[in-house]
Amino acid sequence: MNAPLVAGHAPTSILTWVEGRPVTAAQFCAEVREMAAALPSSRHVLNFCEDGPRFMLATAAAWLRGQAILLPPDRLVRSVLRLQRDFPDAYALCDTPEAERMARDCGLSIARVDFAGDAGEAWPPPELPLDLEVACLHTSGSTGEPSRHRKYWREFTGGAGALSHALGPLPADGVVIGTVAPQHMYGLETTIVFPLLCGARLLPTRPALPGDIAGAMKMARSLGVHRAWLFTTPLQLRAFVAAGEVKGLARVFSATMPIDIALARQVEQDWDARIEEIYGCTEGGTLASRRPTEEDFFTAFDGVEFTIDERGRALALCTYLPAPVPLGDRIELLDAPTTSKRIRLLGREDDLVKIGGKRASLAGLTATLKAVPGVVDGAIFFPADDAKRLCAMVVAPGLSPADLQRALAALIDPAFLPRPLVFVDAIPRNATNKASLPMLRELAVSHGRLRPEAAPICVTASFASSDPVFAGHFPGRPVVPGVLLIERVEAALAANGRRVAELTAVKFHTPAAPGERLDFRIVCTSEGEARFEVECGTTRIASGACKVVPIE
């Protein structure tokens, strides 16, 4: 079965603008067909386009060509090189000289993106198979290594329908303004998929600096548009509000992290715009929303329900997704004990800190830090996986370390007081303004306040089906014996000067078949322990821990 690439538009309706020139839905479809025919033959592509309409054109052309766009968690060279290693057939779509330089530096071939302007019109829109893999996204990595998730056209069309049903139609004279890059799931859904499939129009700008929202609305008025929906994040929104009043924003949507209620009230008062908070995740996309000035709970979108499984994990059940989506948050079900359309967030699943028999929330501790007068921004985190004490990174130009220590001592239990305090000019944040844990740790090390954490040991293995070990081992459906996985962990540790003294824990999550590529990741702590994980793609195969000693 197929579904159209463009929906909710008449052929003559404006989809976006390029250099001030309107691009209708029919003109866009013609541009997509022309560009798709010129793209290299491949299965994967990295979209480095910075301009919103050109990113949309490049993405749609790649999809029509049957290609999946790879969206790294950030634009760091090391992240791109990791994708290039995993997807050696990938090339880059670029619309700026800077993007082309980065692609060349990473050894990628390049396809340049621009609107031809003379492609004519094409209608009806082309259709894509619902089972076409269209994207491979990565989580933000804010709490560790990013994880990978493949997305299919069925999921995008279903998610767009749910989002459109929840938000309602955009005014006929309105536009969408997005502040999050479309390389992130939130930005992709709201500024690319939403305009393509829900009849919305994309304003060709992405505000970043505090005064840019006013500039965006000025651009909109010059194009004959006087109302807009803004999709943004709490941190960006705070900066925009501080820059002054903005006229013409009908609705403001915030996502990626909880919004402060006082900020939400200020937006509605100063901008005369309704503000709504969207809840979602990379794995499932946008799932629910609420009006934070009136509700403390989220209501699921059409086709979405929430549940808690027998292990206590929160799950989203979506009719357009192939399997339940595990959530990174703890939730309270408000409608029924089994499934619910309404939920209350209780905090991140990995946010709970236990020290000395006491419990606290990292988000709560960070909020306390940021509430200290003179603190502009901050983050409290564990400086290493095996750390016993928390660390704080702080932007506070007018405070001394001693002043901040005294202030925190009056507000935080001694067990959770962060040491050291690392004063910086800015907190490292990713494209959605989340403080990335690896980046926090790296910056703290560069400031000389923390010891470098030992690099993980990463190896890859594959066990051929001809190996004698599979003879008689689950006949007809051979699986890799667990002992082989443990032996490979031991071999990797031995190659790095460590001997396994005792296997303290091991769990086999999913069977691995002969011939499958298995990725081993081993982290050695300073206390003589090694923790390991074995994955096949994004599926966890095994995990465990062992005591290790140096090989003499």
Image (tube, rainbow, N blue to C red):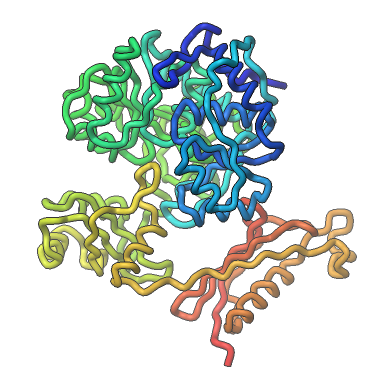
Residue 497 spot, x, y in % from top left: 58, 84
> Which image quarter is the C terminus in?
bottom right
Task: Locate residue 216: give its quadrant.
Answer: top left
Q: Quadrant of residue 4?
A: top right
Q: Quadrant of the N terminus?
A: top right
Q: Nearer the viewer, residue 232 or 501?
A: 232
Side (left or right) of 380 relative to 325: left
Question: Can residue 519 be spotted in the picture?
Answer: yes
Question: Is 33 in front, or is 308?
Answer: 33
Residue at image position (68%, 36%) is 40
Decide if residue 464 is on the left or right side of residue 227. Answer: right
| Position in image of residue 544 (x %, y %) | 58, 68
Q: Is residue 297 visible from the viewing direction of this image?
A: no
Indicate left or right for 473 with 341 as reference.
right
Q: Residue at x 71, y 65 (%)?
A: 461
- Asked if residue 59 lies left or right of residue 267, the reply is right
State the residue at coordinates (45%, 57%).
144
Q: Position of residue 350 (x, y in %)?
A: 42, 54
Report which quarter residue 500 is drawn in.
bottom right
Count of numbered badges drawn on the protein = 0
Residue 10's place in the image compared with 518, above or below, is above
Residue 377: percent from left, percent from top: 23, 50
